[in-house]
Amino acid sequence: MTTLTVLPSGKSYDVAAGSSLLAALQSVGEPIHSKCGGEGRCDACHVHVTVGRKSLSKIQRAENEKLDATVGVSSNSRLACQAMLGEEAITVQLL
Ligand code: FES
């Protein structure tokens, strides 16, 4: 388990490490979008990871290419469907 804090609500949840960030956000009822079913093709699940970014799985080439074409991208950006949770607590900002 790990702790997931979501902004702007500021709520924290215990979620399973090893699952995708998208699945974790959906499981706790946070308003995250997915138009491609978590295939990394739509960028609707774009979030900013403000704390604990290194706890997530590394960005793979396809995610990096998709983020390059995404509006509002920053050095903290991830596609929630492609980021797998590690053991350390993270905080994400929903966009
Ligand atoms: S759900 Fe489509 S890119 Fe993540």
Image (cartoon, grey):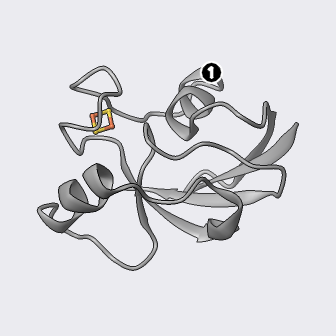
Give the farthest residue toward the bottom.
75
Picture quadrant where residue 23 is located: top right
Q: Residue 27 at x, y = what percent?
A: 62, 21
Instruction: Tell me if the residue at label 1 has its CB under 8 Å from ligand 1.
Output: no
Q: Residue 41 at x, y = what percent?
A: 19, 37
Q: Nearer the viewer, residue 33 or 63?
A: 63
Task: Report helix, strand or loop for mark 1.
Answer: helix
Label 1, residues with CA under 10 Å away: few <14, some 14-19, many ≥20: few
Q: Residue at x 43, y 37 (%)?
A: 81
Q: Residue at x 60, y 42 (%)?
A: 84
Against 55, residue 13 (above or below) is above
Q: Residue at x 26, y 50 (%)?
A: 62
Q: How many marks?
A: 1
Q: Quadrant of the C terminus?
A: bottom left
- Amino acid beneath label 1: Ser
Q: Residue at x 28, y 38 (%)?
A: 40
Give the farthest residue toward the front.
61
Against 40, residue 94 (above or below) is below
Q: Residue 6 at x, y = what percent?
A: 62, 51
Side of 35 where 90 appears, left or right: right
Side of 25 where 85 appears, left or right: right
Q: Residue 63 at x, y = what percent?
A: 31, 52
Against 75, residue 72 (above or below) is above
Picture quadrant where residue 68 is located: bottom left
Q: Quadrant of the N terminus?
A: top right
Side of 23 where 75 appears, left or right: left
Q: Quadrant of ligand 1?
A: top left
Picture quadrant where residue 21 is located: top right
Side of 5 where 25 appears, left or right: left
Task: Report the residue marked by disc 1.
Answer: 27
Q: Nearer the viewer, residue 70 or 6?
A: 70
